Amino acid sequence: MILRRATAADAPGIVALWNDVIARTAITFTTEPKTIPGITADIAARGDGFMVVEEDGQLLGFATYFPFRGGPGYAFTKEHSVILSPAARGRGMGRALMMQLANAARREGVHSLWAGVSGENPGGVRFHAALGFREIATLPEVGFKFGRWMDLVLMQKIL
């Protein structure tokens, strides 16, 4: 397992992994596919805030953080996404990615890291709780995908 900062060369693999999750699951509420130019721009803008995990040259997952909300008052608060391929789940890769991402956030001066977890993803809630995230709120029926309303669980970790 190799953990490292994402590069532009990773964009096609990240897009393939993310778009599969978008199309098939309720892990994310978005229905708009990611694009290689968009992910390439995100990688360039986020620096150490965009990490990947690979094994035998194959990209198996990524984690990234981004502004929680606009405005200078939120400068030290970030939200994150973490997505793993099925081959990476249950092998400690997600935990390792998140530890690297949290370390990068600390170096950047981030104080508070947030997770917005689909209410239909109890495994995601357990994963974040095991990493020290605390459940702060459940926003009922704020996401809509696959013809149904879904809850959003907000979880926070003070770094």
Image: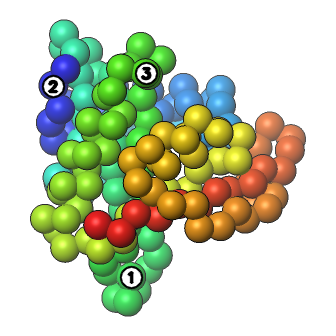
Q: Amino acid at mark 2?
A: Ile
Earlier sequence position, callout 2 versus callout 1 = 2
Within 10 Å of disc 2 (Cα), the crowding (few <14, some 14-19, many 20+) is some
Q: Is residue 22 above or below residue 132?
A: above
**Residue at the spot x=28%, y=22% of the render?**
59
- Residue 90's disc is 3
1 or 3: mark nearer the eye: 3
Asked whether the beta carbons under mark 2 and mark 1 sit within 8 Å of each other, the answer is no
Tag 2 secondary structure: strand
Percent from the top left, x then y, of residue 134?
Answer: 51, 61
- Nearest to the eye among marks 2 and 3: give it: 3
Instruction: Pick the quarter of the image with the C terminus.
Output: bottom left
Residue 47: where, in percent of width, then height? 17, 54
Provide the residue designation for mark 2: 2
The three-letter amino acid code for the residue at tag 1 is Tyr
Res 44 visible: no
Q: In the drawing, does residue 66 fall left or right of residue 121?
A: left
SS at mark 1 in the image: helix
Residue 124 x, y percent position in the rendering: 55, 40
List the residue tagged with mark 1: 74
Q: Amino acid at mark 3?
A: Gly
Mark 2 / mark 3, whichever is N-terminal:
2
Question: Which residue is painted at 86% across and 44% down in the image?
Answer: 148
Residue that appears at 47% across and 17% down: 86
How many angstroms separate mark 2 from mark 3 (CA)?
A: 16 Å
Instruction: Indicate whether 140 appears above or below 122.
Output: below
User: What colouring style does the render use?
Assistant: rainbow
Q: SS at mark 3? A: loop
Q: Which residue corresponds to the image point at 59% horizontal and 50% vertical from the top-left?
A: 117
